[in-house]
């Protein structure tokens, strides 16, 4: 036998036993995005490498060690590690920001060469919402409230909001100097990663998960003491509006995020159900990014959720996918009966919009077909036996409520299934 081809490490197949959860996350999210006025875009998974190094930042973990990059006849291309840079690139390439605002959403695979573990994959899927051209704190909070509503729609209760503000690039610059001084004074306590970050990206040391550094990080000065006035006013308003719409949060002054393009509001929804990979949705303001990528100064804010992690939390919380069984399943044994039944199912699919109907197991015996229909969770079995065939009718057997079987015409069957499909 030929060797089996193995899947690529960290890249998963999502099979039919999992896909109902994905479908649920997608359908609840899609309805909310539309309700808030976000429009969907579909963008390439391959972009020029420079797009990510200039936006996410040369010194971040993502760009410095996690990108799938290759040379394409002299062009350096990269599989997108996240969606925001591509959304801004597309908005600029297509002239969508000339005196306009955009509320866009994106869904699809992202790629990072991370060490795979539960909740952390090399191909994973994000849904992200991006509001371009909006400076007001209302939009930060609208976006956060949208995510809170999404968790409620999915029945999630373990996800909690952590919030911070990291000010403008200028106020961060001052803070970075103070931070470098603090950590330099205790250089001997730092691990290799932090020493590397010290000169180039000191804020990221605050994000370190190394328990040996906890005390040192806790003793570090806070960014809030160096915040510029406008950022402070913006953040106070964000907090007040979150109170107005009743979204609880915890202030986390150490939350800095692992991508360089953020400014002002940053947030993460975290859960205690997934071990180390606790963030299920993260985002914030990125007021400088559009200009950094060659556009005019354009404020912006957004977030992205990881679909795998959301599905894992749903399952950890025991939330079902609300899998929808068929409305009806055919039961017809015998050649002519099967043919009549096959044509009937085709006609019902044509005439009853939205009906969920299954052919079942046409080659099995009559009793096995009936058992199969029952197990499928279908509401009705559409039985075609010898006498039904002769009469050109169908024996309609309710499978769930114990009411009696009855003989119906094709027209009556259409009417009944229309009612069933409409009430689903
Ligand atoms: P991020 O925090 O890098 O932000 O990723 C967003 C979410 O994607 C995370 O909260 C997590 O749920 C999921 N995620 C990230 N990496 C992995 C992985 N290796 N495996 C599974 N899930 C993962 C961004 O990507 C920003 N673009 C978010 C944003 C949008 N900010 C503004 N707009």
Image (cartoon, grey):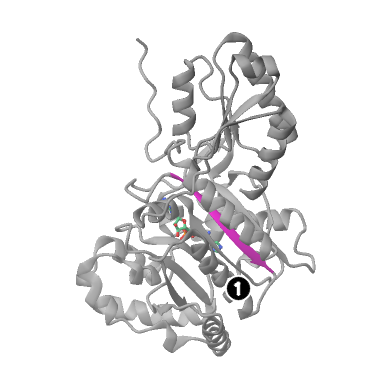
Residue beneath disc 1: 142
Q: Is residue 391 left or right of residue 243?
A: right
Where does residue 105 sit, x and y in percent of width and height? 63, 57
Q: Residue at x 37, y 27 (%)?
A: 6
Q: Residue at x 68, y 73 (%)?
A: 134
Q: Is residue 184 above or below residue 132?
A: below
Give the magenta range.
123-132
- Residue 10 visible, this angle: yes
Q: Is residue 152 above or below residue 51?
A: below
Q: Nearer the viewer, residue 243 or 122?
A: 243
Q: Nearer the viewer, residue 286 or 406?
A: 406
Magenta stretch encompasses residue 360: no
**For the stretch drawn in magenta, what is the main secondary structure?**
strand
In the structure shown, which secondary structural element does the residue marked by tag 1 occupy?
Answer: helix
Label 1 packing within 10 angstroms: few (<14), some (14-19), many (20+): some
- Residue 110 visible, this angle: no
Q: Residue at x 48, y 41 (%)?
A: 19
Where does residue 181 sit, x and y in percent of width and height? 33, 80
Q: Is residue 389 left or right of residue 53?
A: right
Total number of numbered discs in the rendering: 1
CB at mark 1 closer than 8 A to ligand 1?
no
Magenta stretch encompasses residue 130: yes
Where does residue 308 sit, x and y in percent of width and height? 44, 49
Residue 354 sits in quarter:
top right
Q: Nearer the viewer, residue 22 or 291?
A: 22
Where does residue 120 sit, x and y in percent of width and height? 37, 50
């Amino acid at each position: 036998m030929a060797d089996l081809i193995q899947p690529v490490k960290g890249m998963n197949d999502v099979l039919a036993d999992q896909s109902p959860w994905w479908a649920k996350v997608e359908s609840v999210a899609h309805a909310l995005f539309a309700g808030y006025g976000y429009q969907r875009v579909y963008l390439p998974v391959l972009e020029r490498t420079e797009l990510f190094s200039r936006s996410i930042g040369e010194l971040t973990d993502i760009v410095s060690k996690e990108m799938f990059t290759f040379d394409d006849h002299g062009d350096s291309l990269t599989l997108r590690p996240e969606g925001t840079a591509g959304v801004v690139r597309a908005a600029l390439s297509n002239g969508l920001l000339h005196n306009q605002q955009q509320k866009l959403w994106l869904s699809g695979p992202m790629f990072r060469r991370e060490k795979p573990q539960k909740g952390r994959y090399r191909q994973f899927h994000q849904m992200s919402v991006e509001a371009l051209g909006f400076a007001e704190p209302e939009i930060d909070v609208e976006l956060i409230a949208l995510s809170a509503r999404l968790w409620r729609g999915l029945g999630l209760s373990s996800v909690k909001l952590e919030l911070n503000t990291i000010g403008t690039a200028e106020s961060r610059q001052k803070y970075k100097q103070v931070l470098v001084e603090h950590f330099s004074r205790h250089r001997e306590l730092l691990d290799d990663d932090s020493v590397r970050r010290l000169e180039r990206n000191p804020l990221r040391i605050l994000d370190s998960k190394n328990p040996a550094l906890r005390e040192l990080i806790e003793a570090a000065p806070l960014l809030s003491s160096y915040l510029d006035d406008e950022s402070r006013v913006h953040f106070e308003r964000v907090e007040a509006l979150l109170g107005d719409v009743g979204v609880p949060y915890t202030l986390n002054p150490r939350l800095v995020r692992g991508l360089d393009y953020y400014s002002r509001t940053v947030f993460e929804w975290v859960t205690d159900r997934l071990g180390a990979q606790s963030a299920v949705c993260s985002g914030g303001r990125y007021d400088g990014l559009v200009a950094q990528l060659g556009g005019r100064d354009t404020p912006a804010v957004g977030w992205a959720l990881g679909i795998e992690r959301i599905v894992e939390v749903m399952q950890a919380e025991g939330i079902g996918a609300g899998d929808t069984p068929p409305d009806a399943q055919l039961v017809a044994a015998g050649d002519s009966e099967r043919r009549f039944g096959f044509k009937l199912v085709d006609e019902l699919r044509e005439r009853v919009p939205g009906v969920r109907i299954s052919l079942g197991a046409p080659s099995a015996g009559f009793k096995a077909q009936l058992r199969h229909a029952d197990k499928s969770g279908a509401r009705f079995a559409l039985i075609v036996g010898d006498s039904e065939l002769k009469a050109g009718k169908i024996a309609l057997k309710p499978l769930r409520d114990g009411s009696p079987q009855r003989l119906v015409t094709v027209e009556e069957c259409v009417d009944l299934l229309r009612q069933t499909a409409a009430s689903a």
